[in-house]
Image (spheres, coloured by chain):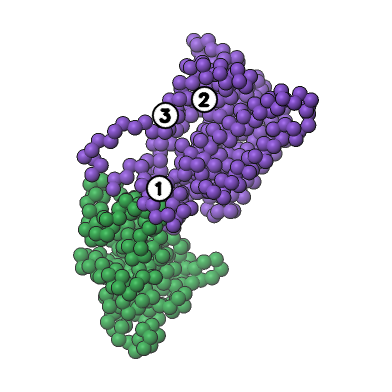
Amino acid sequence: MPALLTVDKLRSGYGPIDVLHDISMTVDAGEIVAMIGANGAGKTTTLMTIAGIVKARAGTITFDGQNLSGAPAHKIVRLGMGQSPEGRKIFPRLTVLENLEMGAFTRTDKPGIADDLEKMFAMFPILRERKGQAGGLLSGGQQQMLAIARALMSRPKLLLLDEPSLGLAPQIVVQIFDVIRDLNKSGMSVLLVEQNARMALRIAHRAYVLETGRVTFTDQASVVLNDPRIRAAYLGE
Amino acid sequence: MADAVKKPFRLGWEPALFLMLIAFPFLPIFESLFFTTTQRSLGDQMPTVFIFAILALGLNVVVGYTGILHLGIAAFFAIGAYTAGILTTAAYSFELPFYVALIVGPILAALLGLLLGAPTLRLRGDYLALVTLGFGEVTKSALTNLQSITAGTQGLGPVPPPALPGLDLDWASDYRPFYFLTLGILIAVVLLLRNIESSRLGRAWVALREDELAANCMGLNTAKLKLAAFALGSGLAGLAGVLYATRLTSTSEPNAYDFNRSIFMICCLILGGLGNRLGVLLGVFILVGFDNILCPIIDAQIQQAFPASGGKIYLQFTGWRLFVFGLALILMMRFRPEGIIPSCRMKHELHPNELVPVTVPGDRA
């Protein structure tokens, strides 16, 4: 069975500068794949290029059997890729409910949307409590939950998460990662970009290590977690 | 929980305002009272206010809904006015009725909006604002210099009144036909915008204004959304332009569509409340009312009180008009930057520390 997402020799960047040099990776259906690396390694750029927000300069991206070359971001969402961007990017002045409804913008099946809204509220009870409040008034952890729930509202086949632990208290990070693991257990495929390598490697099946725009190491997450070089470089040992 | 108890009937501010405006001509006491105290007709001035309200609502689609700073709305206003001039005056062989211009003007303005927007809307923030400013200036210069088409500084005229077949109305001395025509079109525009605001398109615009990247991630086609806002805003400005030329019976001179006009409309939006329909209407009523109704009245009163003052400009209130105007805006920016009737979202942005939960119309919480 072909992989859900296949990235082959992807090159992209901003202005005169190439950030990614020949990135190749795959995500299989039902997997959590972690992408770890230092600041500026190209993790977010990889995600943004896959999502179509940054244009690829070379290489191919195949998602669910379709070639995404040159496809604009809004079409890629329709093909089944949901994203929680870096810094969460919730709509601060829309209510929690409106944020979630905006996540389902590409869908028109009203009963299905209502069903999914109920599911989100069951998964994140705090969002139900706060559904009439402006998204900007939520705490960081609640905003991250909202960002994940909003991405799920498009019923994606693949969920892209960019630094879900960013700026959150350790306890909240544990909560968020539990949510990601549960989501995956119910069948969601996840591509997870993280600086918090330890947490990411604990829940992921496989991992890619990025350095200056190249994949320098890839293996099962447990192998990566126990590799002495990785431990020294990213886990502070 | 709100569903269980039926809300008591409450007339909204917006319908109340329009009911009052509809009732005004039927209660001649107000008109005559105004006339005896000021020697001027209020009803005569109101169509101008309504026309600028349409223009401001069009600008609000671009600036208020999607957050693009548009500094050249006067250009599209001019395109509507000159379309009316070209289609209806005897200077050209078309001599079509007003109602044709009423349809063609907005369409042409909207198309030009698309034409300007398509290559430029990918620019961000200040750069786009500069493009719109430049377009406004180019349009004004073109109108002045394309003498053979626009009659230069003379303007095109006379634009005939919007005659209705079978109905003999006195468009020249009775204020009521124009009053009802412009008010009717304004109400139609308000209803249209009300529907759009609560539609998918309206919500998409709000999301776009909030965070373009996030909107993109949600599957919104941001380029198309901006173009749609630009086209609708320009079209409404064109509509206002057609009415303006018809009201003045001339396109007036190109200077009526200069940068000051664009800025004046932005001021109406900021004063009243950016993004809020009722706020925009109030802003227009206050500023256009001040400019077109109050200033001449005060001038006349001063003339009466000091007959000897003659032509000295500093003894005319009109000379101090911009001073008062500027002062009001400065005070506004200092004490209430969100406008008199802000949109709830805008208020939250400017006063993030007041932890007032946002309640949005139609809140299902």
How far separated are the C-alphas under marks 3 and 1?
29 Å
Q: Residue B215, image x and y in percent?
A: 41, 54
Report the front residue among A52 and B297: B297
The colour with which the image depicts chain A is green
Task: Tell me, for residue B68, which label it has, or none.
Answer: none
Q: Name the residue type under label 2.
A: Thr
The colour with which the image depicts chain B is purple
Would you identify the image quadrant in which residue B19 lies?
top left
B162 left or right of A98? right
- Image point 40% across, 40% down: which residue? B197
Residue tagged 3:
B16
Task: Tell me, for residue B182, which label it has, or none.
Answer: 2
Query: Could you tell me if residue B3 is visible in this image?
Result: yes
**B21 shown above or below B279:** above
Question: Same chain, marks 3 and 1?
Answer: yes
Q: Mark 3 lies on which chain?
A: B
Q: Name the residue type under label 3.
A: Ala
Task: Tell me, for residue B204, which label it has, or none.
Answer: 1
- Image point 30% across, 55% down: which residue? A130
- Contact between marks 1 and 2 (CB within 8 A): the answer is no
